[in-house]
Image (cartoon, rainbow, N blue to C red):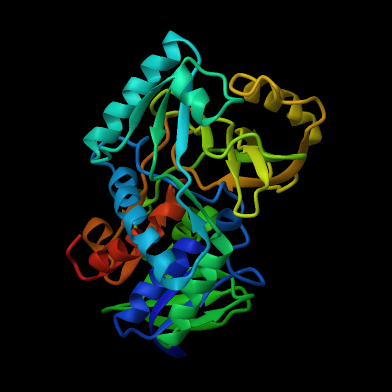
Amino acid sequence: MDEVDSVVIGAGVVGLAVARALALQGRDVIVLEAEATFGTQTSSRNSEVIHSGIYYPPGSQKARLCVRGKQLLYGYCGAHGVGHRRCGKLIVAAGAAQEQQLHAIEARARASGVMDLRWLTRAEARALEPELECSTALFSPTTGIIDSHGLMLALLGDLEDAGGVLATHARATHLRVLQPAGIEVITEDGTGLRARQVVNAAGLQAPALARHTAGFDPRFIPPVPARFAKGSYFSLRGRAPFRHLIYPAIAPGSPSLGVHFTVDLGGQGKFGPDIEWADTLTWDVEAARAASFYAEVRRYWPALPDGALQPAYAGVRPKIGVQGEPAHDFVVQGPKAHGVLGLVNLFGIESPGLTSSLALGEEVLLCLQGAA
């Protein structure tokens, strides 16, 4: 049986960031990816936003790793030529109830160390974005956008330069805890690989892979919703109406950040995602969902023309917990939590996972070094 220092399961942006961190520490690393290439699921089906860390409960993994990850990510993009833009974001309220939600968001942000939010009156918001309708807004100057594919290419390049390897069409189906130490990884074709360290960064499949780990106590596997938390996006025909990202106010703990406006580096505007609890894992966008998008978007952009939205793409959030509950925190679960030397499970790495990716790489190193 072949042996290797470290195996990372899953070549999304988080798996690649973790593998890079391990390889830069001098470890012999192989990344196992089930699909034909890297980043084909969650990492390529999102808003491509660099978040500031303002929505998450103070002290949570999401808050801490997002704030740290944002700093690392801007630095990394600048050093590696990864396309990005610090365009800023307006979180907008329509009326007194939503203004209270903005106050709650600001309080969370300050408690997490995000001190640069600025209140805007309606007139000030409209001076920045003349087509915007709101009663007031919070401006986040350090929110940005990123070329997620370019980021993953850069991470993969770093990994390979450090001697790491990406193996595609290599679906890990089972793990087996070995005694006295080590973990065996078994792939779909029956190939076995012995490793001193394994990081389960399989995204949507991470809880299932943990359930198929012989010698792992199932009490440490979080529940997952019975249905998939799917989010659809619609692209905008014609010129983008805004220069900044536009997000609606949401209640703390909401399962999504609302149907927001983002723009990619090429200037293409899009709206989404919504949230749909689906019985099957599918990536298609139903054109009929556009009706609810028009209603949501016109709350802050009343001039949205009929027929301007077209189906774009859909993503599925790797949620943990029970459907209908407030959003759960990231679970970065190392040996100090579950007792299996060399094993780290990453559960529930939804948004802001992309922003947090480099910080998650640091966190996994700490787990494996016994310091977390």
Expressed as whole percent of the image width and height from the top left, the position of residue 189 reads 63, 78
Q: Relative to 299, say whether 147 is above or below.
A: below
Q: Is residue 251 above or below residue 67?
A: above
> In the displayed structure, does residue 77 sit left or right of residue 180?
right
> Image quarter for residue 260?
top right
Q: Report the residue at 34% width, 37% height from top.
A: 56
Q: Nearer the viewer, residue 184 or 295?
A: 295
**Residue 272 can be seen, yes or no:** yes
Q: Residue at x 48, y 45 (%)?
A: 87
Of 85 and 12, which appears nearest the observer?
A: 85
Tell how many labels.
0
Left or right relative to 298: residue 57:
left
Residue 149, percent from left and from top: 58, 64
Write the residue at 57% across / 71% down.
33
Q: Where is residue 4 in the image (x, y as percent from the top left)?
A: 40, 86
Q: Which residue lies furthest to the left in this view?
A: 371
Q: Residue at x 57, y 54 (%)?
A: 42
Quick check: can you spot residue 200?
A: no
Image quadrant where residue 105 sits? top left
Residue 260, above or below 49: above
**Eyeballing the image, is 43 above or below 124?**
below
Q: Farthest residue to the right: give it.
A: 307
Quarter of the image with the C terminus in it: bottom left
Q: Where is residue 371 in the image (x, y as percent from the top left)?
A: 17, 64
Residue extending farthest to the front is 127
